[in-house]
Image (cartoon, grey):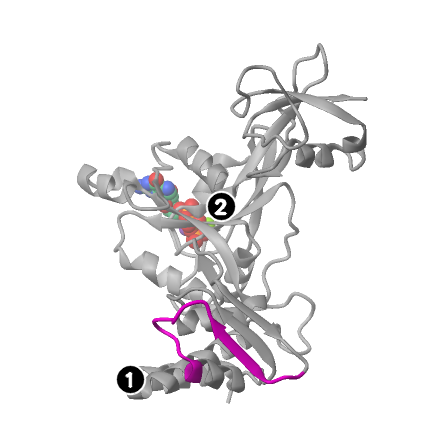
């Protein structure tokens, strides 16, 4: 029996099994098995060439990667052509795009790779269409832009989320607060910070045994942790926690009332590529979601070059900026002058520990 058939069988069994106290453990075990099989599904078949079934052959470039994921004909390629110089074919029929098309979004000196992908359909995670490849590509991105057609039913979004969930992508979520460490010997050691509401020892032991993790240490730090969270921790190498921005396109075709409703949802932006509405907003929001900052350096007496930025993570300090310029720069560092949102007055004289903000201008003075 193939992996896909086994998955179907387990899903069928889970559907048949009534949810109650008596079946709880059995269902927990089935979930664990399902997670393992799904991970297998994503591994390339033996003998398949390098990379087969594991995404498209597009190398990462720039400061971050954003994947455009969505059903066919929602306007992914139209969006790519709007925000990058790359032209990806646009047409009114489904599956116009058949492979990954990379473009570069230039954003105030930062370069973000945008991946236009083929449309996916229900069952993508099980290998329907190009689904598996698309999802593998999405898994390598720093942000997923889920492009949705505002004129289509709300179920689209839940459907796509399920497909991404099925291959281990967790959208807009933090990894569960559970510590798990495999050991060479000593059996299973389990402890809780406080009594968990949805987990118990028997359940955890059963699942660990099923995964043949007979020697390990577990600390449940979150009382709200569920069986699914616990399985995610066991499967950690196959899990990716990725931010997702829901992008509703074609708002030129919906009522103002519905538009207002959509625009107020979490992690959601609305646009019309056709009318050129909301595009800059979307780019700004995507940049915010990436949690990156652009820092411009300035030499004494010279204007900063705003077409070239140093890219650092949110929360970065002047020390991180120095490291981006040159690894040994901080050794000769004397002080820095900062202009911008992080400065209390401009320019502010700061040390290595100063936390910078997006679009700050920094002048580094060395000994
Ligand atoms: N009304 C309206 N139509 C749009 C908008 N944006 C794109 N379209 C149309 O939607 C159709 C599909 O656009 P594409 O960009 O090819 O969609 P896609 O998501 O890349 O489609 P696949 O590659 O087939 O998955 C085209 O006919 C576009 O002209 C919009 O904002 N409003
Ligand atoms: K299309
Ligand atoms: Mg397309």
As drawn, 187 above or below 193: below
Q: CA distance from mark 1 to mark 2?
A: 53 Å
Asked if disc 2 is less than 8 Å from ligand 3, the answer is: yes
Instruction: Name the residue tied to disc 2.
Output: 89
Specify start and end residues of the magenta stretch as a single range. 185-203
Give the secondary structure at mark 2: loop
Residue at figure coordinates x 66%, y 84% from the top left:
185
The percent position of residue 102, horizontal first and vertical second, equals 58, 46
Give the secondary structure at mark 1: helix
Is residue 10 shown to the viewer in this render? yes
Label disc, if present, on residue 21 of the rendered structure: 1
The percent position of residue 342, horizontal first and vertical second, equals 54, 25
Is residue 29 shown to the viewer in this render? no
Q: Dot 1, crowdedness within 10 Å: few (<14), some or many (≥20)?
A: few
Residue at figure coordinates x 66%, y 74% from the top left:
48
Say whether residue 31 is left or right of residue 56: left
Residue at figure coordinates x 24%, y 40% from the top left:
259
Q: Dot 2, crowdedness within 10 Å: few (<14), some or many (≥20)?
A: few
């Amino acid at each position: 029996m193939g992996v896909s058939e086994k998955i179907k069988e387990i899903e069928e069994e889970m559907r048949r099994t009534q949810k109650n106290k008596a079946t709880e453990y059995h269902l927990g075990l089935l979930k664990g098995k399902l997670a393992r099989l799904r991970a297998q599904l994503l591994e390339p078949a033996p003998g398949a060439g390098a990379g087969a079934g594991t995404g498209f052959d597009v190398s990462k470039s720039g400061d971050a990667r954003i994947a455009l994921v969505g059903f066919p004909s929602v306007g992914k390629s139209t969006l790519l052509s709007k925000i990058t110089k790359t032209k990806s074919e646009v047409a009114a029929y489904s599956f116009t795009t058949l492979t990954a098309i990379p473009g570069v979004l230039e954003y105030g000196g930062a370069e973000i790779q945008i991946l236009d992908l083929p449309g996916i359909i229900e069952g993508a995670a099980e290998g329907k269409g190009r689904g598996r490849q698309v999802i593998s590509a999405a898994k390598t991105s720093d942000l997923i832009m889920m492009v949705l057609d505002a004129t289509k039913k709300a179920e689209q979004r839940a459907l796509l989320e399920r497909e991404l969930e099925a291959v281990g992508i967790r959208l807009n979520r933090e990894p569960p607060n559970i510590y798990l460490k495999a050991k060479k010997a000593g059996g299973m050691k389990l402890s809780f910070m406080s009594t968990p509401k949805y987990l118990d020892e028997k359940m955890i032991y059963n699942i660990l045994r099923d995964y043949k993790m007979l020697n390990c240490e577990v600390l449940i730090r979150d009382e709200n942790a569920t069986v699914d969270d616990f399985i995610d921790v066991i499967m950690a190498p196959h899990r990716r926690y990725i931010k997702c921005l829901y992008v509703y396109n074609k708002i030129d075709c919906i009522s103002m009332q519905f538009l207002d409703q959509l625009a107020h949802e979490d992690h959601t932006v609305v646009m019309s590529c056709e009318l050129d509405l909301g595009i800059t907003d979307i780019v700004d929001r995507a940049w915010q979601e990436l949690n990156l900052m652009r820092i411009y350096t300035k030499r004494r007496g010279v204007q900063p070059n705003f077409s070239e930025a140093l890219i650092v993570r949110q929360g970065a300090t002047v020390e991180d900026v120095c490291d981006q310029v040159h690894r040994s720069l901080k050794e000769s560092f004397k002080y820095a002058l900062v202009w911008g949102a992080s400065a209390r007055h401009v320019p502010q004289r700061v040390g290595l520990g100063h936390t910078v903000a997006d679009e700050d201008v920094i002048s580094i003075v060395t000994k």
